[in-house]
Image (cartoon, rainbow, N blue to C red):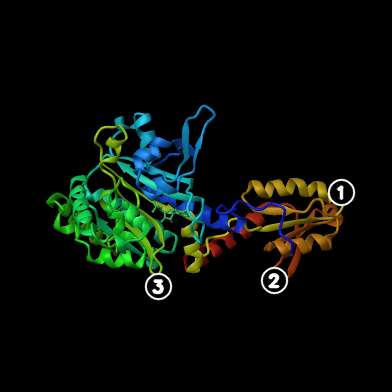
Amino acid sequence: MSSPLYQSPKGVHDILPDDHLYFSFIKKVVRHRCRRAGFRRISTPMFENVDVFTRGIGETTDVVEKEMFVFESKSGKKFALRPEGTASVIRAYLEHGMQQLPKPVELYYIEPFFRYNRPQKGRYHQFHQFGFEVLGEADAAIDAQVIYLAYRINQDLGIADQLSLQINTIGSVADREKYKEDLIHFYTGKERSLCEDCKRRKDKNPLRLLDCKEEDCQILASMAPQFEHVMGEASKDHFALLLEYLEKLKIPYTKNPRLVRGLDYYTHTVFEFWSKSEGSQNATGGGGRYDGLIELMGGQDTPGLGYSAGMERTMEYMKEVGIRPPNKDKVQVFLAQLGLVAKKRSLSLLNELRERGINVVGAVGKDSVKAQMGLADRLGAKYALLLGQIEVQENTIILKNMEKGCQETIPYEGIVDKMVQLVGENKLEDKRLWEE
Ligand code: AMP
């Protein structure tokens, strides 16, 4: 097959109808669970003033240094396509006076994001995330609730048991400053063993050296001083309490002292959900506390906490473990017709069936019954209705069960109710299959 004249740019992808089954299901679960927990949805623009991200995420982070799509307006203003959700949500929170709302303020989003990283499996230039933020509460019980919400969504999606919750604390800003000094001290003189990225990051952002994937850097990281030794009592207590809450909520976790997350704004709790499959460290989602961020972005000192997960990666993961979302697009009924009078009647029957919630297709542009029934087969319709001249005259209709291959002629009167009943029974069956 020759390649098509146009193709999508490298790193971006189409979401085809089969994948939308997953996307719709993920969105439905997220909306449902977030609503239940008191969250309200927010959407921010696809691009922001670049400072929102440089300030919010941190100038020396990978996301800001290397991965932002930055562009200039004609008047020379610099904008960036949003690479993540939190900084924009905080900007909106401050801009719209949401500090006045009763606390905590709980917001969630389901949006596309943009990062200029090397395209590879599960890593795109444009991707989708769902995420949530809780603003205005410092208590460790809130951390536990956010983690529970993320875990509960994974459970609904059928992937919770295949993911491991990795959790760590990176302490308060003051703890981190102390720890950074220790790390710089440790790495000084060992620069030759570090990769280029780590060499560059050593003085500005040494914490990132701990989660570098390069082998030599990992060996050094395993010998680096542990955060625990400099961490203040308040930070340790917060973490210990959180772990207690997680145990109470029966959420399994793995303490991972090397987990630091890529963005600068985190404090105290950080966590990610990793695939349990061997060798895989691909996270489906991650989050943490960011108690200094709102102040950094010009607001009053307000604690905050958030989580976000990649929808493409979640979908790939669901596919990998064999989870199939319910197919809401399935054609349930096909309506075939023969002759002008039948065609006229079938036009209103199509609409009546659709109004009653049935997915129904009618090939009103085709005249041959054989061609129409062939199409019904290819669409996988469970039932076909056939309306010909004789049926119209006798006020009947033919109902065919496509799976069993049997058919009967029945009165036209009451056909809509009958189809609603039949399709309803099948829906129940589908639901049972999904829940098994
Ligand atoms: P992060 O906050 O960077 O850890 O991102 C949270 C989640 O978003 C990750 O665990 C991924 O599932 C997803 N994600 C991040 N970057 C990309 C990307 N370039 N392409 C696809 N998914 C991504």
Which image quarter has ligand 1? Answer: bottom left
- Looking at this view, name the residue that lies furthest to the left: 233
Quadrant occupied by the N terminus: bottom right
Q: Residues within 10 Å of mark 1 (few under 14, many from 20)?
A: few
Residue at position x 43%, y 39% from top? 42
How many dots with numbers?
A: 3
Secondary structure under tag 2 reads loop
Q: Amino acid at mark 3?
A: Glu
Residue at position x 26%, y 41% from top? 292
Q: Residues within 10 Å of mark 3 (few under 14, many from 20)?
A: few
Query: Residue 407 at x, y = what percent?
Result: 75, 67
Sooner in the amino-acid sequence: mark 3 or mark 1: 3
Residue under pointer 1:
340
Real-space CA distance between mark 2 and mark 3, rounded to the nearest whole angstrom: 44 Å
Real-space CA distance between mark 3 and mark 1, rounded to the nearest whole angstrom: 63 Å
Please identify, in this view, whether the residue under mark 3 or under mark 1 is nearer the observer: 3
Using the rendered image of the protein, determine whether residue 211 is visible from the camera's viewpoint: yes
Q: Amino acid at mark 1?
A: Leu
Quarter occupied by residue 294: top left
Sooner in the amino-acid sequence: mark 2 or mark 3: 3
Q: Amino acid at mark 2?
A: Lys
- Looking at this view, name the residue that lies furthest to the bottom: 278
Using the rendered image of the protein, determine whether residue 144 is visible from the camera's viewpoint: no
Please identify, in this view, whether the residue under mark 2 or under mark 3 is nearer the observer: 3
Query: Residue 24 at x, y = what percent?
Result: 53, 52
State the mark number for residue 404: 2
Sooner in the amino-acid sequence: mark 2 or mark 1: 1
Quarter occupied by residue 424: bottom right
Secondary structure under tag 1 reads helix
- Please give left or right for residue 429 compared with residue 134 in the image: right
Residue 406 drawn above or below residue 136: below
Residue under pointer 3:
278
